[in-house]
Image: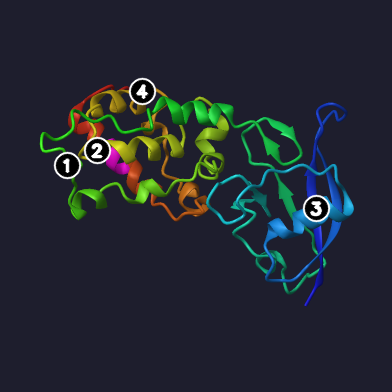
Amino acid sequence: MIIDVPLKIQRFDPDKDAKPYWQRYTAKAEPTDRMLDALIYVKERLDGTLTFRRSCAHGVCGSDGMMINGRNHLACTVLVQKFLPAARPSKPIEIAPLKGFKVIKDLVVDMEGFFDKYRKMKPFLVAGAAPADGRERRQSPKELEKFEDTTKCILCASCTTSCPTFWINPDYAGPQAVVAAHRFLMDSRDEISAERLALIGDTDGVFRCRTVGNCIEACPRGINILKAIAEVRKLLVKNRVGLKV
């Protein structure tokens, strides 16, 4: 059943707008369509100037992170019916860019600072010489379990841009950087733990977290980010490496 879906989208074009403004549209969609489908309808049928990111459309690439009704979501993983209140079906669904980033245009934000913090954590395995027998660097299921959860991150920035500490302190590394560090700190094959701990334990590192928990709610992959933060803090206290609270 195709229905009218009222949308209220934040628009901003720095080349001609002094400040952001809201624009209303009515998309045609089925309740079980994704919010991304509603945005594509607007883009293709109503207003070709609307700008947003999208790629795989299957919740894997993390491209279409945005705020929907005040909370961070991937537009390709949430259904239209989730945001249509039965009591007020005519109330528009509000869509805005991720909070805390500079807006490039409409729903597209500048994520370069976010990726700089990710790259700072050296998000790659640094292992020693290969085993003498030529076999792979083997791990037990128990060793894998320590970091498997944080391998799920898709770099959508939903966790970081939902964090109140990041909103007031853009220099804070943010939840995602902690997740990136955790993934390798807990990997038994990695050999630069001390360096990673120094990076994530600096003044704007993991101890800036106030455990509000927005990051867990915002993560579309269900990563237990607060658990990762607690484990990284425990490592820092245990090793006393780069600890600057």
Q: Is residue 4 above or below residue 135?
A: below
Indicate the amino acid at tag 3.
Lys
Query: Which residue position holds label 2?
Result: 234
Separation (CA) of disc 3 from disc 1: 57 Å
The magenta segment: 230-234
Query: Which residue position holds label 1?
Result: 135
Residue 215 x %, y %:
48, 47
Is residue 99 located in the magenta-colored stretch of the structure? no
In front: 140, or 196?
A: 140
Q: Which mark is residue 48?
A: none
Q: Which mark is residue 8?
A: 3
Indicate the amino acid at tag 4.
Asp
Q: Is residue 138 above or below residue 208?
A: below
Residue 36 x %, y %:
69, 56
State if disc 4 and disc 2 touch (CB < 8 Å). no
Separation (CA) of disc 2 from disc 4: 15 Å
Q: What secondary structure is marked by label 1?
A: loop
Q: Tell whether 229 sits left or right of 108.
A: left
User: Who's the residue at 45% across and 39% down the image?
Assistant: 176
In front: 227, or 77?
A: 77
Separation (CA) of disc 3 from disc 2: 44 Å
Indicate the amino acid at tag 2.
Lys
Residue 167 x %, y %:
57, 34
Separation (CA) of disc 4 from disc 1: 37 Å
Q: Is residue 70 above or below residue 82?
A: above
Query: Which residue position holds label 4?
Result: 202
In front: 152, or 208?
A: 152
* Mark closest to the chain's N terminus, 2 or 1: 1
State if disc 2 and disc 3 touch (CB < 8 Å). no
